[in-house]
Image: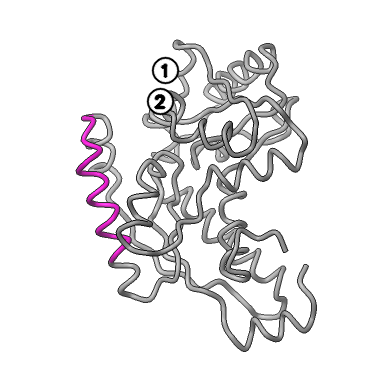
Amino acid sequence: MISDNEIFMKGMMGLKTAGLLRGMSWESTLEYYRIMNEEVKERLGGSHSTKLLMYSFDFKEIEDLQHAGKWKELTAEMVSKASNLKAAGADFIVICTNTMHLMASDIENETGLKVVHIAEATGEEIVKKGLRKVGLLGTRFTMEGDFYREIIKNKYGVEVIIPEEADRKIVHDIIYNELVKGIITQESKEKYVATIDKLSDRGAEGVILGCTEIPLLIKQDDVDIVVFDTTAIHSKAAVAYALNGDDGND
């Protein structure tokens, strides 16, 4: 919690304005909006709330490009919309999805705006917990790509393991066939818990819910190892940056 004097100064200077590139489903983006506003109110008190602009994609178009492997087109689209947010007054960018951080560096390079990176924010939380080995759930693109795991490994010294092939398919399919459509079932929860248990058996001390829809299905009470809810972690990191101009180690 920042001091009373700092609160006064933040009120005088104003929060930085976040530019949100909406996540895979509007349900998970609702969580960003809720958590960011709650975090600002908790930090500043009174009637304070967050400042943000948002571009909301038609996710069906994004999904089709992802599964067609058209990442160049996706990058161009993400950069274009981030540039629009900058022109509208955004001071920094928040990509409300793990997978699309594939093009975080492209957005920073093209817009000149800071992208508050979800993997870096998550890595900070893992280090705070003192863990050395964690599992990662997410889309196939996130689990099998290097962009997320390498940040956690190289920057924070934490080993990241992923489910076996059959379980990766289950995790990926539930995301696209159910979670992004707002479908939450007990059967799918049990499949995710079983997958997390297997990661635990392989030595994972925690699990990264590396898709912003997964926290809609899995909660800390569902499993025995530490859960890293990337939606909540990322939202709070965004507020910390809006207040402090850094990733929030205030």
Residue designated by label 1: 169
Q: What residue is rendered at 26% in x and 42% in y?
A: 60
Q: Nearer the viewer, residue 178 or 238?
A: 238
- Vertically, is 143 above or below 238? above
Amino acid under disc 2: Arg
User: Residue 80 colored magenta?
Assistant: yes
Q: Report crowding for label 2: few under 14, some 14 to 19, many 20 or more residues within 10 A (C-alpha).
A: some
| Left or right for 2, reference 19 | right
Q: Secondary structure at mark 2?
A: helix
- Vertically, is 79 above or below 100? below
Q: Which mark is first along the chain, 1 or 2?
A: 2
Image marks 2 and 1: residues in contact by CB distance under 8 Å: yes
Chain part drawn in magenta? 68-83
Give how far across and how far down residue 241 sits, in percent: 58, 64
Q: Secondary structure at mark 1?
A: helix
Residue designated by label 2: 140
Q: Report crowding for label 1: few under 14, some 14 to 19, many 20 or more residues within 10 A (C-alpha).
A: some
Q: What residue is rendered at 69% in x and 12% in y?
A: 201
